[in-house]
Image (tube, rainbow, N blue to C red):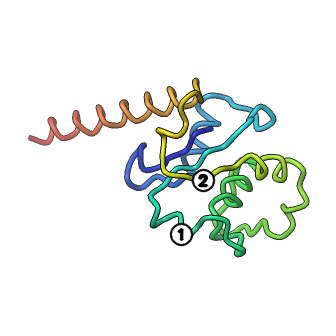
Amino acid sequence: LCLYGNDIDTTTTPVEAALTLVKQHAIDSASIEAIHIGMPEKAMRVVDNREMHNICVQDMVCANLARGGLPLRELPFPGILADPVFARLRARVTVGGGLFQCAGSGRVMTALDRLHRRRQRRLRRGAQHQQ
């Protein structure tokens, strides 16, 4: 998976991007070989590999993928740390600057691009109808 939430729109988080891609493309977590989370450098300083699991982007993405999403009030930590699905996904996460680093991710990057284009078209159509 190649996740850069702001490439979908300015309010989408990497967790939402991951869950959206997995659902839309029926991706089984066992088939995920790598997860790249792209974000601006300033944001990375806040959420990259934090000891507090609930603000660590790697932990939150993997916990959500392992559980198929989490209700806002559910606190999966520290229990999920022993989950082998979580551990396998967590070992495959990288965080960096953005999609350009994901070249070769094939199907998922293409799917993300299509999702972004569809949303942009919808926004343009909505703006045209309002005029």
Percent position of residue 37, x then y: 58, 49
Q: Residue at x 46, y 52 (%)?
A: 12
Of the 4 image quadrants, the one containing the N terminus is: top right
Of helix, strand and loop, which one carries label 2?
A: strand
In-front residue for pair 86/121: 86
Indicate the amino acid at tag 2. Val
Mark 1 vs 2, N-terminal side: 1
- Quadrant assignment, res 70: bottom right
Q: Are marks 1 and 2 in contact (CB under 8 Å)?
A: no
Of helix, strand and loop, which one carries label 1?
A: helix
In-front residue for pair 9/126: 9
Percent position of residue 13, x then y: 51, 55
Q: Does residue 61 sit above or below 110 in this rendering?
A: below
Q: Is residue 50 left or right of residue 117?
A: right
Percent position of residue 10, x then y: 37, 53
Q: Identify the disc placed on residue 13.
A: none
Q: How many marks?
A: 2
* Mark 1 neighbour density, 10 Å: few (under 14) some (14–19) many (20 or more): few
* In the image, farthest residue toward the left: 131
Q: Residue at x 70, y 75 (%)?
A: 52
* Mark 2 neighbour density, 10 Å: few (under 14) some (14–19) many (20 or more): many
Q: Identify the disc placed on residue 95.
A: 2
Q: Is residue 123 left or right of residue 17?
A: left
Percent position of residue 30, x then y: 81, 35
* In the image, farthest residue toward the bottom: 52
Q: Does residue 55 sit above or below 89 in this rendering?
A: below
> Which residue lies under the disc numbered 1?
45
Indicate the amino acid at tag 1. Arg
Q: Residue at x 8, y 40 (%)?
A: 131
